[in-house]
Amino acid sequence: MASLGNEVTPHILDVLDRAFEVQLNNEDEEPPIIKAPFVSPSDLDPQRVSLEERESSSDDPINELKERAETDQEFRERQKSRSDAYGVFLDKLSEKTAADLLGDIGYSTIQACTELAPERVTAWANRVLNASGWKRRALKPVGLHIAQALAEIEPDVSYPLYSKLLKTDGFVKFHTGSAKIDHDAIALWFGASIDKVRDECFGRLDNCADDERIHLEVLAALHAQRADLLKAYCDNRLASTHPMKVCRGLIVAATANIAAIEIDQLLGTPGPIGTAAKKAADIQRDWNSMRHWWDALCKARSEEAFWQASLLLRKCVDARYDLLEDKIESDSVAERYLPFIEQEISKAIERAEKQLSNTLFGDRLSNIWFVEIL
């Protein structure tokens, strides 16, 4: 069975080729922009679309016996029937079906396609690059998946695709996590194995105008599993003689929980570095407190212990809540009662992020008088 899951057959490549062709030939009017939360494909069961008759399996004994008993002529006719049905499916692929296929396809499928036929995926990248108007906007989500998949093997194709798509507003604006992290930022950090993309990611960190934006950019990198690049960024900034670069490195290191420097050594330093070191120490303390009370909440054996842990968790929680390891056991107190406090946790995260939006390196924005020269 050909399916749009993690397993890819040559049939899938044909279907996606046809879907791109149909979508790019679509003459419909431009649809409106929609904002929606991004759900990671790993959080969902893979969507599968049957493209041909289901083959019999070991747990389907009746069909298996029928197929074993068929003659060579019957076998050829059955195979021809499947082939004809598949051809009809491709020929009659509607614009809506093509848009649904390209809109729902996940990174894992594109990655599998890249391993099977990289030249076909490169051709899709060029199609997206050459698309004009609203068609490129409609193809932005799958285009970013393609850019990610080609980052390692075709950086010369991947980088122009990144550059063009990140300057394009998609019709669906995806975000993820409690802090509503921009999916474009996560996609960019995914491709940071390309030097130019990495430089752009570092530039985004350098240009963050308040602690909240630094926080969200670091979380985007962590969601993309790029802690190694954050470490490299912090090492570079903390080695600088420019105090503002050191301040930025301190906040990034504390937010990502990177042991890049002993923050305690800088506490009490006069000027902005001392202020940033204090803020970094507070960020680290909140992370340690968050992990402690989350563990206590997960291990609670009574309703009283759960509510006590949840109350103390909400006093220190921030957007890094999404990075906490899920330790909730089946049929535990936490599993029964966590849904009742999730909204309160979300509100606490919003309050924490709002406070960060009013500061830069721990100092109120109204007190910032320096100009950072990078």
Image (cartoon, helix red, strand yellow):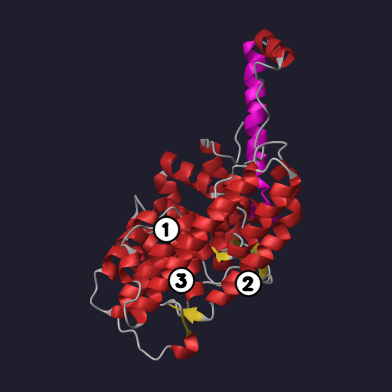
Real-space Cα distance between discs 3 and 2? 16 Å
Per the image, the residue denoted by label 2 is 351
Per the rendered image, the range of residues in magenta is 71-98
- What is the crowding at mark 1: few (fewer than 14 residues within 10 Å), some, or many (at least 20)? some
Picture coordinates of residue 3 (x, y %)?
A: 61, 37
Mark positioned earlier in the residue sequence (3 or 2): 3
Picture coordinates of residue 56 (x, y %)?
A: 67, 20
Label 3 is placed on what type of residue? Ile
- What is the crowding at mark 2: few (fewer than 14 residues within 10 Å), some, or many (at least 20)? some
Residue visible at 35% across and 88% down? 371
Q: Quadrant of residue 21?
A: bottom right
In the rendered structure, does residue 164 fall within the stretch colored magenta? no
Residue in the foreground of this view, choosing between 135 and 349? 349
Per the image, the residue denoted by label 3 is 214
Q: Which is in the foreground here, disc 3 or disc 2? A: 2
- Please give left or right for residue 238 compared with residue 348 in the image: left
Dominant SS of magenta comes to helix
Q: Are marks 3 and 1 in contact (CB under 8 Å)?
A: no
Mark positioned earlier in the residue sequence (3 or 1): 3
Per the image, the residue denoted by label 1 is 257
Label 1 is placed on what type of residue? Asn
| Element at label 3 | helix
Residue visible at 45% across and 89% down? 367
- Please give left or right for residue 211 compared with residue 262 in the image: right
Picture coordinates of residue 329 (x, y %)?
A: 65, 37
Q: Quadrant of residue 203?
A: bottom left
Residue visible at 72% across and 16% down? 63
In the rendered structure, does residue 96 fall within the stretch colored magenta? yes
In the rendered image, which quarter contains the N terminus? top right
